[in-house]
Image (cartoon, rainbow, N blue to C red):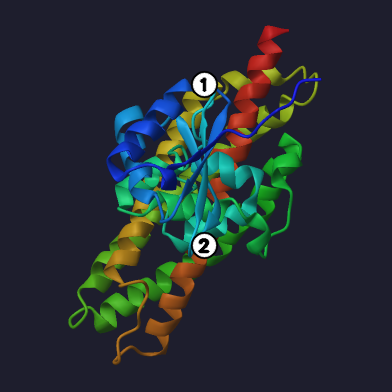
């Protein structure tokens, strides 16, 4: 019977100048999927950045113990082709983890195709801290407990229409009205409201056509993928676009809408109402983040779950 021993490197036993060379040498000996456990007397976080800079994103990093006297880190070598999951993939598998992304301002819907490290690098955020929090989903809470990733394509498409499309159609006219009123009443002293009004109008123009495109062309075809539907060919060619091309265009529209709300958030200083803000001003700055939150959930369900599954399903059908 073969005995499996843990691969441990205790660098507290080495002179300082030998520590990093010894760690790199041991890491380079790892085969894909293997790991070593590093023991140190302080947080080895500088090693994380040195390893990332000199070896690239080919390793995993998990704290097993964090001081105050001993730090233990498990460092693994990734399997080729299994580089870090994207923000969108992580959120799709466990929506609780989206709470970590929200906490650090990481875009998991429109920007969901980036890895954690790529997104953190762009924002100047400590990636090890984010990754550490993601490793403990049991400590996270999410008000949304739906298992979207397990739903059928048709059910998810109907859910998006009945909840998110209807939410937009119900609330966007009122949002436009308050944006216009606040710009007219307070725009002289708060010129950012003029820009916010313009951005809301741009979102309105983009969204209404966007919803129609999804409901008339994309969603009927996606739903047809679940059945031997004789109308599938008609549904597919209605928009004179292949599924992947259609989805690429819709994701670009998602990105435009997401960028518009990023700009609105910046202009409003995270929706802070000034001292001279009236009731309409306060209501607008309550409606905007609520609308943005619904959009994030809406786009997440499409970009990270519905669209990839539809493309995979169509690809599998063609392979049969």
In the rendered image, residue 235, in percent from the top left (x then y), is placed at 64, 23
Q: Is residue 288 visible?
A: yes
Q: Which residue is denoted by mark 1 in the rendering? A: 81
In the rendered image, residue 307, in percent from the top left (x then y), is placed at 58, 33
Q: Is residue 254 visible?
A: no
| Residue name at image x 35 percent, y 58 percent | 262
Is residue 39 placed above or below 234 in the rendered structure? below
Is residue 19 placed above or below 77 in the rendered structure? below
Q: Secondary structure at mark 2?
A: helix
Specify the quadrant that holds the C terminus: top right
Q: What's the mark number on residue 258? A: none
Asked whether 20 or 209 is in front, the reply is 20
| Residue name at image x 45 percent, y 55 percent | 129
Q: Reading the chain from its start, which is encountered first: label 1 or label 2?
A: 1
Label 1 to label 2: alpha-carbon separation: 33 Å
Q: Quadrant of residue 303?
A: top right
Q: Which residue is denoted by mark 2 in the rendering? A: 293
Q: Could you tell me how many numbered marks the image carries?
A: 2
Q: Residues within 10 Å of mark 2 (few under 14, many from 20)?
A: few
In the rendered image, residue 238, in percent from the top left (x then y), is placed at 57, 23
| Residue name at image x 22 percent, y 78 percent | 187
Query: Which residue occupies the extreme top position in the image?
Result: 320
Q: Secondary structure at mark 1?
A: loop
Task: Give the number of the mark in front: 1 or 2.
Answer: 1
Is residue 290 placed above or below 50 in the rendered structure? below
| Residue name at image x 56 percent, y 52 percent | 134
In the rendered image, residue 133, in percent from the top left (x then y), is placed at 54, 56
Asked whether 120 or 303 is in front, the reply is 120
Q: Residues within 10 Å of mark 1 (few under 14, many from 20)?
A: few
């Amino acid at each position: 019977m073969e005995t499996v021993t843990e691969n441990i490197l205790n660098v507290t036993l080495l002179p300082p100048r030998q520590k990093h060379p010894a760690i790199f040498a041991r890491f380079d000996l790892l085969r894909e999927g293997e790991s070593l456990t590093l023991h140190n007397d302080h947080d080895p976080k500088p090693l994380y950045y040195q390893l990332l800079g000199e070896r690239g994103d080919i390793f995993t990093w998990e704290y097993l113990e964090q001081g105050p006297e001993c730090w233990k880190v498990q460092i693994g070598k990734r399997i080729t082709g299994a580089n870090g999951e994207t923000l969108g993939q992580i959120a799709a598998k466990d929506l609780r983890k989206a709470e970590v992304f929200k906490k650090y301002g990481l875009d998991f819907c429109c920007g969901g195709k980036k890895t954690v490290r790529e997104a953190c690098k762009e924002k100047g955020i400590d990636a090890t801290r984010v990754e550490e929090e993601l490793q403990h989903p049991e400590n996270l809470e999410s008000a949304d407990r739906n298992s979207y990733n397990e739903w059928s394509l048709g059910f998810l498409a109907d859910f998006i229409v009945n909840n998110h499309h209807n939410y937009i159609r119900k609330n966007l006219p009122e949002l436009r009205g308050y944006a216009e009123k606040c710009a007219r009443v307070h725009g002289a002293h708060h010129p950012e409201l003029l820009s916010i009004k313009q951005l809301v109008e741009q979102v309105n123009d983009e969204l209404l056509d966007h919803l129609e495109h999804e409901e008339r062309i994309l969603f009927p075809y996606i739903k047809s993928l679940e059945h031997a539907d004789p109308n599938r060919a008609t549904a597919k060619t209605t928009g004179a676009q292949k599924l992947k091309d259609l989805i690429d265009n819709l994701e670009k529209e998602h990105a435009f809408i997401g960028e518009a709300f990023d700009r609105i958030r910046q202009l409003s200083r995270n929706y802070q109402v000034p001292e001279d803000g009236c009731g309409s001003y306060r209501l607008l700055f309550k409606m905007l983040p609520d609308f943005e939150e619904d959009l994030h959930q809406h786009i997440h369900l499409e970009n990270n779950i519905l669209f990839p599954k539809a493309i995979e399903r169509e690809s599998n059908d063609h392979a049969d």
